[in-house]
Every structure is written in structure tokens, then in C-alpha cells.
Image: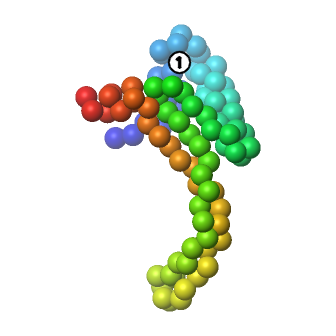
């Protein structure tokens, strides 16, 4: 099972006493701040919960699975997520 955006907004609204509209605005704002900081190369950390950072990924050689042709994949960035201690404990039950 997974929670979609609508269900997440409703759950946040129920826990905080916000309206669904305000909870949705807060979620959008969080998303924007996260994206802006990662794009600038800055990590976002919520102690005990989650750390999100931009990590460099080096250039590498890949293979096209349909043709077997070798491809040069350029260097780039990826998103690295690290679970905090409280999140890890919650998952363990």
C-alpha cells in the first residue's frame, strides 16, 4: 500500500487542524524549498527523520539492452536520501 498526495494532504490536515487547502499549500512549500536547496547544492536535514542531499555521479559506460551498443553516460547528479534514527526505529517496529 502507498499513500497518494490527496491522502497525505488529508492526513496532515487532520493531524494539524489545518484545512486541506492550507495543508496542501504547506506540502507544496516544503517541496519547493527542498527542490530549491538541492538545485543550489545544499542538503536539507530534518534531525532524526530524514536527510536529503545532492550527490555527484561520475561518467560511466552503459550498454543499450536492445542493441548491445556501448554508450557513454555523462556525469551528473543524483538525490541521496538518508533515513534518520527516529524513522529507522519506526520502520523496525
Q: Does 26 appear above or below 61?
A: above
Residue at the (64%, 19%) spot, across then down: 22
- Residue 29: x %, y % from top left: 68, 29
* Quarter of the image where the C terminus is located: top left
Secondary structure type for disc 1: helix
Q: Nearer the viewer, residue 9 or 81?
A: 81
Q: Is residue 62 visible?
A: yes
The extreme top residue here reads 17
Residue position marked by numbered label 1 in the rendering:
13
The location of residue 83, given as percent across then percent down, is: 44, 36
Comparing 38 with 13, the one in front is 38
Image location (x, y in percent) of residue 68: 48, 88
Residue 48, picture quadrant = top left
Q: Residue at the spot x=55%, y=78% of the render?
A: 61
Q: Residue at x 65, y 71 (%)?
A: 74
Position in image of residue 66 (x %, y %): 48, 85
Amino acid at each position: 500500500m502507498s499513500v497518494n498526495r490527496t491522502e497525505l494532504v488529508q492526513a496532515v490536515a487532520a493531524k494539524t487542524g489545518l484545512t486541506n487547502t492550507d495543508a496542501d499549500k504547506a506540502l507544496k512549500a516544503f517541496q519547493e524549498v527542498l527542490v530549491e536547496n538541492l538545485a543550489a547544492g545544499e542538503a536539507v536535514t530534518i534531525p532524526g527523520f530524514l536527510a536529503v542531499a545532492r550527490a555527484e555521479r561520475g561518467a560511466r559506460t552503459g550498454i543499450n539492452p536492445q542493441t548491445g551498443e556501448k554508450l557513454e553516460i555523462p556525469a551528473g547528479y543524483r538525490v541521496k536520501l538518508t533515513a534518520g534514527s527516529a524513522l529507522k526505529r519506526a520502520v523496525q517496529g
